Amino acid sequence: MLEPPVKDYEVKATELTRPFWDAVRAGRLIVQRCSACGKTFFRPEVACPHCLSTEWRWVESSGRGTLYSFSVVHRAPSPAFTAPFIFAAIDMEEGWTLFSNVIGIAPDEAKIGMTLRVSFEHPSDTLSLPLFRPADD
Ligand code: ZN
């Protein structure tokens, strides 16, 4: 069973990304939704990447998505990581995509298209991460 691959890391939040990280620490997943075209987008941007509007707001995500693609990383990219881990692209229900890790399964159990749900992990006192586990339902 894979555990969170990062035990301690300093997230350098900016004014733009701080609401996302504060929400994660509080056990909520939020995403930007454009007020002009209605699309969601991630990573955080000052303007909508679909229509360039700067009118957007943070909205709640269901935390559910499907595994679009993944890679099993066998060599840690830095001493902060523990390998192996699953690096995953996850298509969220609201139409946005984020990169995260799938945990709670063995590397060979990951399947493209599997349903995932967010799992808020707190590997250290200062680090909270939105990782993903297979959905039970
Ligand atoms: Zn837009």
Image: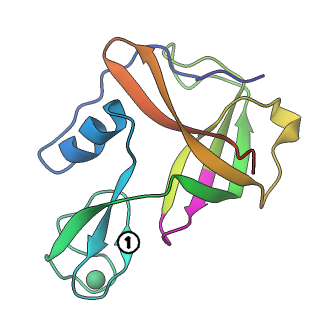
Q: Quadrant of the rendered structure where residue 77 is?
A: top right
Residue 82 location (% of width, % of height) = 62, 17
User: Is the residue marked 1 within 8 Å of ligand 1, measured from its CB?
Assistant: no
Side of 51 relative to 74 (left or right): left
Residue 92 location (% of width, % of height) = 55, 62
Q: How many marks?
A: 1
Residue found 83% across the figure and 29% down from its top:
106
Side of 94 relative to 16 (left or right): right
Residue 71 location (% of width, % of height) = 72, 44
Residue found 83% across the figure and 51% down from its top:
111
Q: Is residue 54 above or below residue 87?
A: below
Ligand 1 quadrant? Answer: bottom left
Along the viewing direction, whichever of 77 and 106 lies nearer the viewer: 106
Q: Residues within 10 Å of mark 1 (few under 14, many from 20)?
A: many
Side of 93 relative to 39 (left or right): right
At numbered mark 1, what does the secondary structure look like: helix, strand or loop?
A: strand
Instruction: Residue lying at the far front in this picture: please name it.
Output: 137
Residue 109 location (% of width, % of height) = 86, 39
Q: Is residue 28 above or below residue 85?
A: below
Where does the magenta region start and end? 89-96
What colouring style does the render use?
rainbow
Residue found 34% across the figure and 11% down from its top:
125
Residue found 27% across the figure and 87% down from its top:
51
Quarter occupied by the N terminus: top right
Q: Is residue 124 above or below residue 31?
A: above
Amino acid type at image mark 1: Thr
Residue under label 1, please give it: 40
Q: Is residue 69 above or below residue 74?
A: below
Q: Quadrant of the rendered structure where residue 119 is?
A: top right
